[in-house]
Image: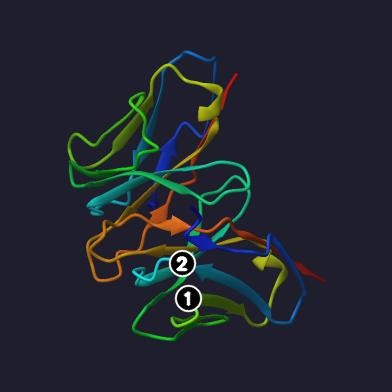
Amino acid sequence: DTGVSQDPRHKITKRGQNVTFRCDPISEHNRLYWYRQTLGQGPEFLTYFQNEAQLEKSRLLSDRFSAERPKGSFSTLEIQRTEQGDSAMYLCASSITVSTDTQYFGPGTRLTVL
Amino acid sequence: DQQVKQNSPSLSVQEGRISILNCDYTNSMFDYFLWYKKYPAEGPTFLISISSIKDKNEDGRFTVFLNKSAKHLSLHIVPSQPGDSAVYFCAAKLTGGGNKLTFGTGTQLKVEL
């Protein structure tokens, strides 16, 4: 089985560096989501794709953040000029367009910015 | 502005008893609600959901109740098992308002032997 996978699982970087995370959704899922979770909080929505189109972006997604899903399959999330406040768990989820549209999450990428 | 609230950060229950996790929301436009369970170092795992046109949905040991007038939902786990120990998140969404989920802050459930 192939649930949602994310790579890397952990990333430690220095402030000011760029980082890129990858998400592979469940195959045939046409919707893909990125969330961010910090300690003691629930996941917060960042952005969402339907196929290759980015349909919604949160105001949490500053200009330093960019997400792509070029062929409607995997997605990447890039953070430029990382700041210590970017330290969080970055979660990816996918779903398929049916009545319930339940989102299934990957294991997350833990980012630590030193 | 926290639109989905889980006011109990933690709950401890004995094995075999009922666990009741609560969730309140403020946005009356939410029309679909979900519960996720999360173990440390893993992503949230979907448990059960309910549409706003229903007031109860059951799946095995898990039952979700929705009280729309009170803007309140609850997750019942019967009987509770040690493997149920995890953080439980309530989430809500608006159909037609994008597909983003709005999560509560979670409740840490500990099921003791």
Q: Residue at x 56, y 77 (%)?
A: B74
Q: Position of residue B69 (x, y in %)?
A: 45, 83
Q: A77 or B68, which is in the foreground?
A: B68
Check the image and name the residue furthest to the right: B113
Dots 1, 2 in contact, CB < 8 A: yes
Q: Position of residue B76 (x, y in %)?
A: 60, 79
Mark 1, residues whose alpha carbon is within 10 Å: few (<14), some, or many (≥20)? some
Q: A97 or B26, which is in the foreground?
A: B26
Q: In the figure, B79 relative to B92: above or below?
A: below
Applied colour scheme: rainbow
Judge from the rendering whether residue A20 lies leftward or rightward of residue B109; answer left or right. left
Residue that badge 2 annotates: B26
Q: Amino acid at mark 1?
A: Lys
Q: Earlier in the sequence, mark 1 or mark 2?
A: 2
Mark 2, residues whose alpha carbon is within 10 Å: few (<14), some, or many (≥20)? some
Judge from the rendering whether residue B54 lies leftward or rightward of residue A86; answer left or right. left
Q: Secondary structure at mark 2?
A: loop
Q: In the figure, B90 relative to A60: above or below?
A: below
Q: Residue at x 47, y 31 (%)?
A: A8
Q: B80 or B75, which is in the foreground?
A: B75
Q: B51 or A96, which is in the foreground?
A: B51
Q: Position of residue A68 (x, y in %)?
A: 25, 33
Residue that badge 1 annotates: B71
Q: Amino acid at mark 2?
A: Thr
Q: Position of residue A101 (x, y in %)?
A: 30, 64
Do circles 1 and 2 both sit on a common chain?
yes
Q: To which quarter of the image does residue A110 belong?
A: top right
Tell me the chain of label 1.
B
Q: CA distance from mark 1 to mark 2?
A: 7 Å
Q: To which quarter of the image does residue B100 belong?
A: bottom left
Q: In the figure, B32 relative to A37: above or below?
A: below
Q: Residue at x 36, y 79 (%)?
A: B52
